[in-house]
């Protein structure tokens, strides 16, 4: 194997802050490099440098040199990177939603055919030749095993996982592709989809394409990478073939402190199986992409119930439907009384609080201060933190500040102060603000969806710990929806698996991965029935 | 020791256009001092203009905060205000009391008009600003007919010849002319008089609106404007919040035109309401608001800058140049400001 890429002694400053310190990485042809690090460790900056993103050059460039295929190169624009054969699949989707899969894959590399006008006026007026474009797009999709994606479908209607695969297909359709950077490719995928993706990555590697694989899911990195580089605070703190590392060692090096398995504290009062706080029967939720079609379950008072399942099967729809964010029908009884669906206000008034999976879209007022984010809902729904003034009931700045400071301390929210806008906080801290907001509402039942999506290992543990604390100390019933099975297994009492919008199985956290896998595929019952 | 760091932070937060206008204004005052124009007279006039226009600018606040942009349909509220004034004249209520009655009537009328207007805006969610502009034009055209048809009979109001239809401008001399301006007015020196009532009224209106935005219905408007989904998950009905914002804006506009009219001394009918919108929109934007975010500070600062600019530029620039440059300046500043704010929106959104 010959050396493909060498990034030597890379240094980068952002406004006086050193974000990369003498980072050196090397990559051979066909090699898979796992790049891991907490949020803000410098992974994205390093990749932006490699890809010549304008943000690097508008902030003063970088120090060090890049050697590609034995030659020193100056990558000053993404265009240049693409010419060299470097492709990148970004964390955020870079697809045109109103275009078909084919058009997205072949964007700017369309196959055209001449016509009368183009013969006169030149190549720019040639028409798209849809047939070969389709074929090539098909080929690219088939290469990565995505036979089920229709190449003529509009991207807008695709599930997130498929969008991810379309992005990858677009990159491998470029024939000159030598190096593919995958930035958190599995963040939005479920475990089985991630598995497919990992297989694709291996396949590409066998074809001689080098890959830089960035992921928060360490076991994936361990599984797929040949070599691992660990970044912490802009410096390389660990490097070597993957055989050198175990999961725990990587996690430890990444965060710089020991990570142990969650040890769950005992309950004061043992769970009573017959005490049902909420009983859901035949719930239908019309949530595009996460349709729920007849889901039923009894939620026990004081438990932590996990809801898992593959993306698009409806697990996210359950919480959204109960809280009233999407139109829902069904029969729900709550504390012995009938529960009114489709009304967030009714839910709030009855102690049902929802922390959305869409943190930035639903959960936060990005330009508002940390304190307003924490209390706004409490003021609105319950008139908390208010006082009478000149006949008006207005909110009380002092009470709000006091409460916010208390929550910031309790949850260890890293911010400059309660007046800082949440937009500038990191993902983990934003999530803590969401949890603080939820806790302020004194929930009886707390629905939390994907609380650790896109946040780093250290913050993840804090968030899960806090959920357990709420459950044990305040007796709050928690319904945790997550795509990460390990997370569900670590803190839940029971785990409900949703498949095709229905309850497929309720499993104890000690159940084997095989059982979970079968349940997610909706085949557990059949296997049990037929032995 | 001056803390340069915090000073630089403070300047950074001010908008570039606001800064330009401020410097331009300072330049004008220097020019005024150099020429023979009396600076005290200019200041006195400026304060009157700030007070008379301020409430109209305030009307922009609720809709911006509800996330539907400045209320380009200001004429809707203005019509309601004018009707209030006309009814007072018809019944010949003389003196300052007439102003308060007119305000009361206009609030009732605008409550109804605002409701209908809000219902319409809800149907065109996402394109409010454009639709508002056309609603403004339409209602002015419609009312131009109505002014001729409505059964007003007070001879001071209707055309002297023919005896039918309302005049273009109606003098308020025997009614509530200067009702606020003269309230507790005091004189300092020869050229400077302070319209206490007017300023107190503007300040009071600002304070009330500020208080309103600290109440739950006010907060609901804020939440809706900032993140509709967050608002929904906080138990807010965004439709209702937006409706409240539009009604509030319309009501304030009605009060605003009456404040304007009592200071000006005339009620202006027919096409006149159309010319109130853009200066009001421009004012709040100059004050540093964007079409998505605005505060009371933006309202006050913007009104002060815009109105002072107009008052000062006329006498000062006419000394330096020929002709009436003020009107040109007003158009450049107000339209330019709106254009700037609109082009800035996409950047803000990201």
Image: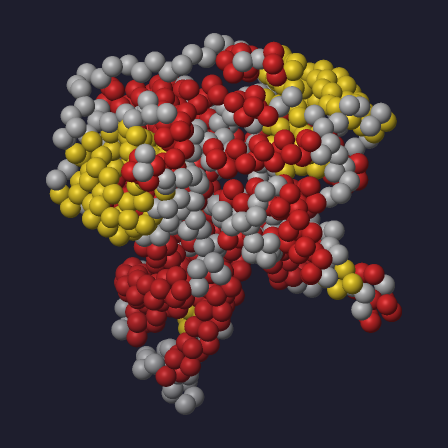
Residue A482 can be seen, yes or no: no
Q: A351 or A385: which is nearer to us?
A: A351
Q: How many marks?
A: 0
Left or right of residue A434: residue A477: left
- Residue lying at 30% horizontally and 75% vertically, measured from the top left: B90
Where is residue A32 shown, x and y percent of the image?
A: 66, 26
Q: Quadrant of the C terminus of chain A?
A: top left
Where is residue B150 shown, x and y percent of the image?
A: 34, 81
- Residue lying at 82% horizontally and 28% vertically, measured from the top left: A69
- Residue lying at 75% horizontally and 17% vertically, measured from the top left: A9
Residue B151 location, quadrant: bottom left
Q: B277 or A148: which is nearer to us?
A: A148
Residue A68 location, quadrant: top right
In the rendered image, the vertical position of residue B209 relative to residue A458, given as above or below? below
Q: Quadrant of the N terminus of chain A?
A: top right
**Color theme of the render:** secondary structure
In the rendered image, the vertical position of residue B77 relative to residue A438, given as above or below? below
Left or right of residue B100: residue A300: left
């Amino acid at each position: 194997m010959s050396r493909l890429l060498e990034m030597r002694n890379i240094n980068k400053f952002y406004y006086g802050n050193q974000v990369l310190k003498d980072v050196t990485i090397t990559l051979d042809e066909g090699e898979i490099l796992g790049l891991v690090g907490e949020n803000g460790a410098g992974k994205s900056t390093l990749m932006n440098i490699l890809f010549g993103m304008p943000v690097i050059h508008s902030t003063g460039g970088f120090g060090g040199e890049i050697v590609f295929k034995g030659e020193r190169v100056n990558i000053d624009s993404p265009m240049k990177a693409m010419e060299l054969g470097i492709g990148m699949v970004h964390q955020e989707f870079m697809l045109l939603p109103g275009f078909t899969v084919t058009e997205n894959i072949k964007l700017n590399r369309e196959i055209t055919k001449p016509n009368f006008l183009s013969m006169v006026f030149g190549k720019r007026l040639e028409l798209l030749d849809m047939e070969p474009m389709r074929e090539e797009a098909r080929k690219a999709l088939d290469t990565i095993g995505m036979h089920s994606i229709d190449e003529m479908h509009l991207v807008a209607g695709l599930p997130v996982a498929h969008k991810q695969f379309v992005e990858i297909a677009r990159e491998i359709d470029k024939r000159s592709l030598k190096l593919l950077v995958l930035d958190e490719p599995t963040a939005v995928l479920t475990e089985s989809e991630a598995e497919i993706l990992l297989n694709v990555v291996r396949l590409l590697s066998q074809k001689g394409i080098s890959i830089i694989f960035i992921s928060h899911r360490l076991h994936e990195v361990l599984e797929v990478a040949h070599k691992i580089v660990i970044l912490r605070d802009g410096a390389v703190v660990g490097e070597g073939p993957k055989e050198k590392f175990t999961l725990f060692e990587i996690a430890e090096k990444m965060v710089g402190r020991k990570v142990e398995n969650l040890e769950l504290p005992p309950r004061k009062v043992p769970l009573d199986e017959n005490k049902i706080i909420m009983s859901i029967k035949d719930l239908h939720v019309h949530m595009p992409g996460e349709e729920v079609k007849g889901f039923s379950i009894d939620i026990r008072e004081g438990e932590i119930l996990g809801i898992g399942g593959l993306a698009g099967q409806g697990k996210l729809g359950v919480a959204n439907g109960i809280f009233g964010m999407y139109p829902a029908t069904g029969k729900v009884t709550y504390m012995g009384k009938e529960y009114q669906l489709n009304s967030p206000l009714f839910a709030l008034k009855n102690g049902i609080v929802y922390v959305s999976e869409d943190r930035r879209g639903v959960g936060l007022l990005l330009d508002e201060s940390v304190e307003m984010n924490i209390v706004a809902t409490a003021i609105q729904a319950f008139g908390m933190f208010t006082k009478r003034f000149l006949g008006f009931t207005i909110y009380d700045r002092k009470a709000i500040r006091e409460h916010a400071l208390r929550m910031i301390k309790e949850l260890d929210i890293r911010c400059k102060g309660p007046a800082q806008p949440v937009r500038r906080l990191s993902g983990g801290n934003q999530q803590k603000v969401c949890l603080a907001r939820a806790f302020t509402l004194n929930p009886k039942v707390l629905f939390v969806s994907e609380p650790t999506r896109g946040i780093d290992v250290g913050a993840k543990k804090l968030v899960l710990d806090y959920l357990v604390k709420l459950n044990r100390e305040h007796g709050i019933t928690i319904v945790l929806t997550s795509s990460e099975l390990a997370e569900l297994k670590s803190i839940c009492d029971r785990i409900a698996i949703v498949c095709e919008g229905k309850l497929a199985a309720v499993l104890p956290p000690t159940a084997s991965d095989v059982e979970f896998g079968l349940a997610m595929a909706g085949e557990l019952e059949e296997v049990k029935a037929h032995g | 020791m001056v803390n340069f760091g915090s000073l630089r932070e403070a300047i950074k937060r001010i908008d570039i256009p606001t800064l330009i206008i401020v410097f331009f204004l300072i330049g004008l005052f220097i020019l005024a001092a150099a020429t023979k124009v009396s600076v005290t007279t200019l200041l006195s006039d400026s304060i009157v203009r700030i007070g008379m226009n301020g409430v109209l600018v305030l009307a922009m606040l609720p809709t911006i905060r509800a996330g539907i942009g400045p209320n380009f349909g200001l004429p809707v509220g203005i019509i309601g205000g004018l009707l209030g004034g006309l009814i007072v004249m018809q019944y010949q209520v003389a003196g300052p009391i007439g102003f308060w009655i007119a305000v009361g009537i206009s609030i009732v009328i605008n409550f109804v008009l605002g409701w209908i207007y809000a219902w319409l805006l809800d149907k065109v969610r996402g394109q409010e600003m454009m639709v508002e502009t056309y609603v403004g034009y339409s209602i002015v055209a419609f009312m131009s007919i109505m002014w001729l048809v409505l059964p007003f009979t007070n001879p001071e109001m209707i055309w002297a010849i023919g005896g039918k239809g309302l005049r273009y401008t109606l003098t308020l001399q025997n009614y509530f002319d200067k009702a606020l301006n003269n309230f507790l007015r005091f004189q300092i020196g020869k050229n400077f008089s302070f319209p206490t009532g007017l300023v107190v009224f503007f300040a009071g209106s600002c304070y009330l609106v500020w208080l309103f935005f600290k109440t739950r219905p006010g907060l609901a408007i804020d939440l809706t404007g900032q993140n509709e989904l967050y608002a929904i998950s906080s138990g807010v009905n965004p439709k209702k919040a937006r409706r409240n914002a539009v009604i509030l804006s319309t009501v304030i506009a009605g009060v605003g035109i009456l404040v304007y009219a009592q200071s000006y001394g005339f009620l202006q009918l027919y096409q006149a309401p159309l010319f109130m919108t853009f200066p009001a929109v421009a004012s709040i934007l100059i004050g540093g608001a964007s079409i998505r975010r605005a505060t009371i500070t933006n309202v006050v600062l913007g009104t002060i800058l815009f109105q002072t600019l107009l008052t000062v530029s006329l006498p000062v620039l006419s000394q330096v140049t020929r002709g009436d440059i003020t009107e040109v300046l007003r158009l450049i500043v107000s339209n330019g400001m709106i254009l700037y704010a609109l082009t800035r929106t996409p950047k803000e959104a990201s």
